[in-house]
Amino acid sequence: MHPRSNTRRLLASAAVVMTMLAAGTAAAAAQQPMHQTAHAAAPQLSAISCSSATVCEMLGISGSKPEILGTANGGTTWKLQSVPKGIFTLNGISCPSVTTCFVAGAGASAPDVLATMNEGKTWAIQHLPAKMYGAFAISCHSSTTCEVVGDSDSGSVAGYVVGTTTGGKMWKVQAVPSGQEKLYAVSCASASVCTAAGLNEAGKGKVSHTAAPTAIIRTTNGGSSWTSRTPPAGVILGSSLACPTPSVCEGVGYLATMATEVIGSANAGATWKAQTSSSTKVVLEGISCKVSASCMVAVQDRKSFTSISGEVLVSSKIGGPWTPRLLPTTDHAPVAVSCATTTICELAGNNSDVGFVLRTTNGGKTWSKQVLP
């Protein structure tokens, strides 16, 4: 098992740790030792990517077995797909077309990418450069162009980025500015413009959560060079990031107090601003933006550690305002959302250790529950 890949969300922030312990999300389940076992219920879910209104792929874990599920009919039916042997962790997914998806994950001793070019009928392992230690997130703007972010096995913890322009036939290490400790999120608005976020370095691998713990880097030339951007002061930005255009990015942020906020930039990442009131009782899990003025955030409303309700925040304007919309009362802990259009979205979550999927066709005003295998 790849130890650092299996600590992706636990390392993101103390808020994420508390969320996992309280809500039992799929990401937390992925941290446990891996043993091949069959599942008797729907898998716990962790990530979802929809390339169209009908085609989506989803990641989960059943017992200790990583799972990929797919739908080609808008979630009317979901089918389990075959995960190649030797893969133990699935961290992030990006589907740039209805036939093509890439997954960042890990095998027994090193990070890998899984790729399908036939709607999930088969998945192939693509090995990443040897010095990459953890592959935490992936963003693919096309079937040939992707970026993977994580950290390196260089003797000291450091942010690491690899990219491909060949659909994964070859992955190349890209130079990033110094001072990155780990990169947890990436979003590519075009083949050349991508933004990544994570934690900065504060001496010997330790992280300061009171100064400027966030690392934000940006490329405008397909990864040939990355430059640092000014992070929001005192905010840990990195658990989820969505950049629908080269100038607009939205992200989920955590404060040192473990309060959560939506953080956004409308000027190519030059400055970032909080767009929602911070709260220690609301956990923002994932964000999806189809166009610059239409975004949705998956939210866990923690009234207490045992009382959790699910909702989404939706925005139809750059920078908000953000409007909360409740999920069905039986669905408590959403973890990821993917919007194929401004109104059609799929949301994945977990009730205790059982996954659920919801679909909206009206921008989150109403939701229908879907059946998982």
Image (cartoon, rainbow, N blue to C red):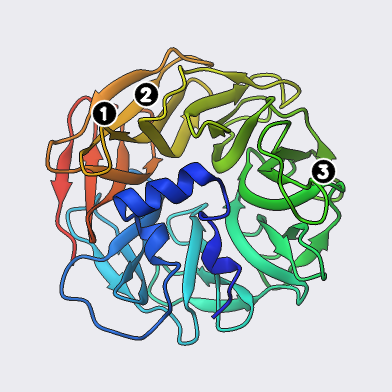
Q: Nearer the viewer, mark 2 or mark 3?
A: 2
The image shows residue 246, relative to residue 196, as above or below, that is: above
- CA neighbours of label 1 inside 10 A, class few (<14), some (14 to 19), many (20+): many
The image shows residue 316, relative to residue 134, as above or below, that is: above
Q: Which residue lies at the image location 29% right of the left edge and 35% below the top edge?
A: 302
Q: Which residue is mark 3?
A: 221
Q: Which residue is mark 1?
A: 364
Residue 314: numbered disc: 2
Are the residues tagged 2 and 1 within 8 Å (C-beta)? Answer: yes
Question: Seen in the image, is 143 located left or right of residue 15?
Answer: right
Q: Position of residue 20 (x, y in %)?
A: 38, 52
**The N terminus sits in image quarter:** bottom right
Q: Which residue lies at the image location 66% right of the left edge and 38% below the top edge?
A: 209
Query: In the structure shown, which secondary structural element does the residue marked by tag 1 occupy?
Result: loop
Query: In the structure shown, which secondary structural element does the residue marked by tag 3 occupy?
Result: loop
Q: Position of residue 197 (x, y in %)?
A: 66, 42
Cα–Cα span, label 2 and label 3: 31 Å
Amino acid of disc 2: Val
Amino acid of disc 1: Gly
Q: Position of residue 168 (x, y in %)?
A: 66, 68
The image shows residue 123, relative to residue 183, as above or below, that is: below
